[in-house]
Image (cartoon, grey):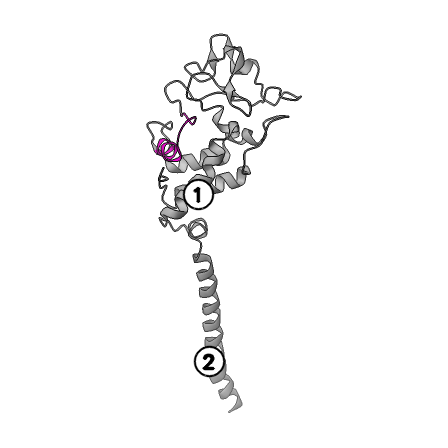
Amino acid sequence: MTSSKKQTILPAGRAIYLLLAAAAVSVTALSFNTDPYHRQRVYGVVENDSTASKKAFLAAYEVLMHPRCMNCHPSGDAPLQGEDSHVHTQGVKRGHDGKGLYALKCSNCHQAENTPGLHMPPGNPNWHLPPEDMKMVFEGKSPRELAAQLLDPKLNGGKTKEALIEHVTHDPLVKAGWNPGEGRELPPLSHEEFARQFTRWIETGAYLPDK
């Protein structure tokens, strides 16, 4: 009799335990689901959210328009310099490949690493402007204009949305903006936060800002 009672009670106990566990998982999942970005990163769910998308791009835009980024994305064919984004001295020009014109090559001064000293040339093994046939101008662009340009493969070097995320997250030249050498300001967001906001813009729908 005792053995029979145990056999009857244990399955019921297991059922109650499983119900409680399932409820806990549902509550946890619901708490995660309040953040669309979290859903996308953890569960692979893509959900359009125009408000979140536009807000994320405006945060990333502050970095894109900072001198550490914009100085290498000028409206003209000369790179910009300094916190006031003045035209580069020495008469430097873009050139067809973005690495300088004639003997004035970027690599003449911009070495593989930052040159030590205050306001000395920053360095990177691949220092360059965008090439002549794909200038990717940031200077003077409104948030809406810049977002539209970034999304257009005919203007962004043929990049998909996934490639854009990869570019801002891992490209060493992009990351060099957070290691600009002595005497230079850092962008207003950390690189990690910038990449997060840029990714959030794309993954919540890549909406264009209103203006």
CA distance separating discs 1 and 2: 49 Å
Q: In the rendering, which numbered label is found on residue 12?
A: 2
Which of these two is toward me, 17 or 38? 38
Taking the spot 42% from the left edge, 52% from the top edge, the residue there is 36
Residue 169, percent from left and from top: 49, 36
Between 75 and 150, which is closer to the camera in this rendering? 75
The spot of residue 189 in percent (x, y) is 54, 38
Q: Relative to the observer, which residue lies in front, 173 or 6? A: 173
Label 2 Cα neighbours within 10 Å, binned few <14 / some 14-19 / many ≥20: few
Identify the magenta region: 137-151
For image coordinates 44% across by 49% down, the residue present is 37
- Tag 2: amino acid: Ala
For mark 1, does the 10 Å Cα neighbourhood hold few (<14), some (14 to 19), or many (20 or more) residues?
many
Query: Label 1, on which residue?
Result: 56
Please give the name of the residue rendered at 44% of the width and 37% of the height, measured from the top-left corner.
Answer: 165
Q: Secondary structure at mark 2?
A: helix
Residues marked 1 and 2 touching at CB (< 8 Å): no
Residue 91 lies, in percent from the top left, at 50, 10
Q: How many marks do you count on the picture?
A: 2
